[in-house]
Image (spheres, helix red, strand yellow):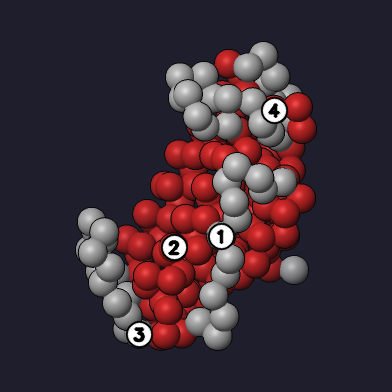
Amino acid sequence: MKKNLDLTTTLLDCWGVTNLTSIHLIKTIDPTLWNKKIPGYSRKTIGMLAIHLHNTRCTWIKDIGKEKSGRMLTALNSHLGTKKELLFAMKQSGKEMLALLEHCIANGGRLPTRPAWLNFPNDVIHLLAYFVAHEAHHRGQIIMASRQLNKPFERAEAGELWQWTKRQKEFRK
């Protein structure tokens, strides 16, 4: 008899993989690109776009799981934040996002609050899909902008973004 899939573990693993994939991408951004303007955007830089990932997580945690969080995360200044600061912050916000998902699961799979901006069903599976899609979208923007700025990611670095089994093993350590 086949064992049923443990959905809680699978959902949390999915976030862990997403978080580590975003962190991997940030680690591999060419340092000379951090303050470069993104082609087509007059005021956005690669660094600002990368920092947006953490800052959005801070908003989600505050809006959805405020009552469960013992501490609120601090958003980074998108104009002044460094890659080193962002990598540290992403590890923290990744853990808090995991705690938010656990909180939603413990709440019967429902979000404990419904923010005004919520534009999807009020359940943890759609919430996770939203988180994953948001991060993947911006990772793609960073990769494209790097290419447009003549500093494309090395093939091996870009390929690492698809090593989800490897990221899952890293997450479970």
Provide the residue designation for mark 3: 107
Question: Which residue in the protein does label 1 denote?
Answer: 75
Q: Earlier in the sequence, mark 3 or mark 4?
A: 4
Instruction: Please report whichever mark, 3 or 2, sits nearer to the chain's N-terminal start.
Output: 2
**Image marks 3 and 4: residues in contact by CB distance under 8 Å:** no
**Image location of residue 124, percent across then percent down:** 35, 69
According to the image, label 2 marks what residue? 59
The span from disc 4 to disc 2 (Cα, nearest Å) is 26 Å
The tag earlier along the polypeptide, 1 or 4, is 4
Residue where numbered disc 4 is placed: 33
| Mark 3 element type | loop
Going by the numbered disc 4, the residue's amino acid type is Leu
Q: Which of these two is toward me, 105 or 28? A: 28
Q: Quadrant of residue 107?
A: bottom left
Amino acid at dot 3: Asn
CA gap, disc 3 and disc 4? 42 Å
Considering only order in the chain, which callout, 2 or 4, is on the residue closer to the N terminus?
A: 4
Of marks 3 and 2, the one in the foreground: 2
Observer-nearest residue: 110 or 38? Answer: 38
